């Protein structure tokens, strides 16, 4: 394997998404082992619902959750949306680097509390609109969710679709993000009484997962949990 990696690094030199040095070990594809090991995890003192870091040890939640009115029960994230992890997600979303999805799924399995999978009936990827999916050629959250389904044995179901074209969330401020996705999703197939894990790439304001959860709950899903690669702080 070391010989193969060495040949790959000579024939196809690739910069690490984090440190920008050429990768010699392709175990983590677009991130070198040192940067992968250094990906920052969320601290212990976080909101139990949305994983936002909070200051007070006596707080039982964060202001954003109170303002948003969560439809999901809780969200877990594998790391902080910064540095090499942020760049790896951007590679996966915008640079046609689908193989990064397997690395992202592996990071999730290594770092989140695996109790999130207990009792879950299905894993559902956050959907793209048909126009975005056509332009990109694939849905990066589907690719991550597929690997998680393979690892856990929980069925992968595309039970939500996006029915309304909306501006990209990363082009909007917080208030606009929270309004942007209202009515943008609908359910496909039976979700009544199901416990569902919704997979997305990044949790920022929570608007995407919350609106998907709202849509699923309207269709009588019992519980919706969120699982993301990274949490923006």
Image (cartoon, grey):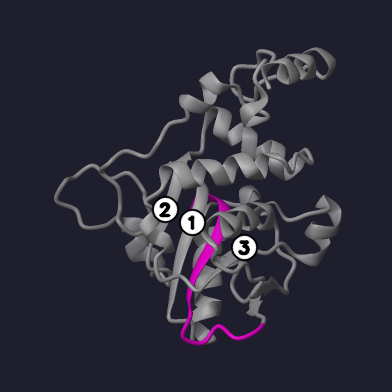
Q: Which quadrant of the structure image shows residue 177? A: bottom right
Q: Which residue is mark 2?
A: 76
> Residue at image x 45%, y 42%?
110
Which quarter of the rendered picture does the N terminus lie within? top right
SS at circle 1:
strand
> Residue at image x 81%, y 51%?
136
Is 23 in front, or is 77?
Answer: 23
Q: Is residue 131 visible?
A: yes
> Residue at image x 75%, y 67%?
165
Give how far apart the Cα atoms at labels 1 and 2 are.
5 Å
Residue 208 covered by magenta stretch: no
Q: Is residue 87 left or right of residue 61?
A: right
Q: Earlier in the sequence, mark 3 or mark 2?
A: 2
Q: Earlier in the sequence, mark 3 or mark 1?
A: 3
Give how far apart the Cα atoms at labels 3 and 1 are.
10 Å
Q: Are marks 3 and 1 in contact (CB under 8 Å)?
A: no
Q: Position of residue 71 (x, y in %)?
A: 43, 72
Q: Position of residue 227 (x, y in %)?
A: 49, 56
Give how far apart the Cα atoms at labels 3 and 2 are.
15 Å
Question: In the drawing, what numbered circle is on residue 227?
Answer: 1
Is 98 in front, or is 130?
Answer: 98
Q: Which residue is mark 3?
A: 125
Q: Are marks 1 and 2 in contact (CB under 8 Å)?
A: yes
Residue 196 covered by magenta stretch: yes
Which residues fall within the magenta stretch?
189-205
Q: Which quadrant of the structure image shows residue 128? A: bottom right
């Amino acid at each position: 394997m070391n010989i193969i990696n060495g040949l790959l690094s000579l024939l196809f030199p690739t910069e690490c998404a984090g440190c920008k040095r050429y990768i010699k070990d392709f175990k983590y594809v677009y991130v070198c082992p040192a940067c992968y090991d250094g990906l920052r995890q969320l601290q212990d003192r976080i909101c139990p619902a949305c994983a936002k870091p909070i200051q007070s040890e006596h707080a039982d939640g964060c202001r954003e959750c109170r303002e948003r009115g969560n439809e999901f029960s809780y969200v877990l994230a594998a790391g902080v949306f910064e540095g090499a992890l942020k760049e790896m997600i951007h590679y996966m979303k915008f640079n046609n680097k689908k193989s990064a999805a397997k690395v992202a799924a592996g990071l999730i399995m290594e770092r989140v509390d695996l109790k999130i999978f207990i009792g879950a009936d299905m894993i559902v990827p956050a959907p793209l609109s048909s126009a975005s999916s056509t332009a990109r050629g694939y849905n990066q959250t589907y690719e991550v969710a597929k690997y998680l389904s393979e690892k856990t044995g929980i069925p992968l179901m595309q039970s939500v679709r996006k029915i309304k074209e909306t501006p990209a969330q990363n082009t909007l401020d917080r208030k606009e993000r929270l309004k942007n996705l209202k009515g943008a999703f609908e359910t496909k197939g039976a979700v009544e009484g199901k416990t569902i894990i919704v997979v997305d790439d990044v949790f920022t304001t929570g608007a995407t997962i919350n609106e998907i959860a709202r849509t699923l709950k309207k269709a009588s899903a019992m519980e919706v949990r969120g699982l993301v690669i990274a949490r923006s702080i």
